[in-house]
Image (cartoon, rainbow, N blue to C red):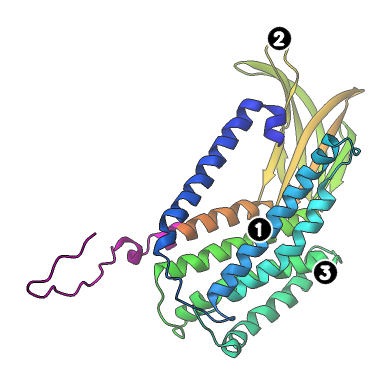
Amino acid sequence: VHSFASDPARGLFILGFLAVVIGVALGLYAWRAPTLDRAVGFSAFSRETFLLINNILLCVAAGLVLLGTLYPLILDALNAGKISVGPPYFETVFLLPMLPLLVAVGVGMHTAWRSADTSVVATRLRIPAALAVVAGIAITLFLYGGKNVLTMVGIAAGLWLVFAALLDPVRQLVGRGPRFSRAALGMSVAHLGLGLFVLGVTVTTSFNVETDQRIAVGETVSIGDYNIRFNGAQPIRGPNYQGLRGEMVVTRDGQPVATLHPEKRVYGERSSPMTEAGIDAGWSRDIFVALGDDLGGNAWSVRLQYKPLIRFIWLGALVMAFGGVLAASDRRYRIPVQASVPAASPGSQPARP
């Protein structure tokens, strides 16, 4: 939607890309559908059941997002009024299918195909579940100083996936579990990445700080646990631009952390100023500083952003991708399955294709 609004050509490219990806996937499914064995059954507590639950919940989540996107457009087309659907709607309704989905993912990866023993799975997962709940509450209260119940639930859900994904690899490392294939290891790695992704999204959404402030040369502003001192802005000239470069010194508890240099650039003679943010990146948080307008009197407006664990979002996506590649590299997926055909008796006719 946003791509079409800002650049129709870019929107058409994205639409074409989605059509190719989804079309190929559906075409492959239609091609292989006749080979599926419909006679194979499975019990109510099995990996197949949890995969079906996951698919249903993902479809529900996609439907809720689509509803929030199209409902205002439908009302407008019917002249029934104008409404705006913003982040509060999506953040609220998306949690409804996602929380049970995350629970199902953690249980499903430890459930056998076709049929599983409920008591065995429950015994195996009770320690990871208890650790996730306790750690989720402790991290929210003591590490980030938060008290929001949904934040505790989100952090606990992310840790639940991390602990559940690490359970089998840890058991193998200590010699208490059977050796497992690349496919199984890739599954654990991919679910570990999903857990890291959930942690990053939850912590960043719950504890990010964004503020616009006026700051003069020599003044200090605070964001999170950090203090940022503005030392002024100096003119700069690049190969195809000119502008101003600020100097921001970031400290924590009186100790220097980083020196950031946000810039305001002008490309050509008539272009609007472009902002180049100064970023101090780290695994635990990112700090963004962007110069705004010159307010006169050596004062500027600045935008400050503090985003904890935002790197976990990207790390989780990369780990999920690596897990998928690792699982796909399993040797079993590269060996063609040869069906055994009984030898023909003398005088028999060859089978028709």
Instruction: Give above or below for 340 relative to 228.
Output: below
| Between discs 1 and 2, the one toward the N terminus | 1
Query: Is there a contact, CB below 8 Å, between mark 1 and mark 2?
Result: no
Q: Name the residue nearer the viewer: 34 or 217.
A: 34
Instruction: Give above or below for 78 relative to 191.
Output: above
Secondary structure category for the residue under label 3: helix
Write the residue at 73% across / 10% down.
270
In magenta stretch: residue 349 = yes
**Range covered by the magenta-colored residues:** 325-353
Instruction: Give above or below for 180 relative to 301.
Output: below
Query: Is there a contact, CB below 8 Å, between mark 3 and mark 2?
Result: no
Determine the image quadrant of residue 142: bottom right
- Quadrant holding the C terminus: bottom left
| Between discs 3 and 1, the one toward the N terminus | 1
Write the residue at 25% across / 67% down.
338
Instruction: Give above or below for 134 relative to 144.
Output: below
How much space separates mark 3 and mark 2, taking CA atoms? Answer: 53 Å
Determine the image quadrant of residue 183: bottom left
Which residue carries the number 3 mark? 141
Q: Would residue 351 be visible to someone looking at this image?
A: yes
Q: Where does residue 24 sit, x and y in percent of width and height?
A: 47, 46
Determine the image quadrant of residue 59: bottom right
Circle 1 residues within 10 Å: few <14, some 14–19, many ≥20? few
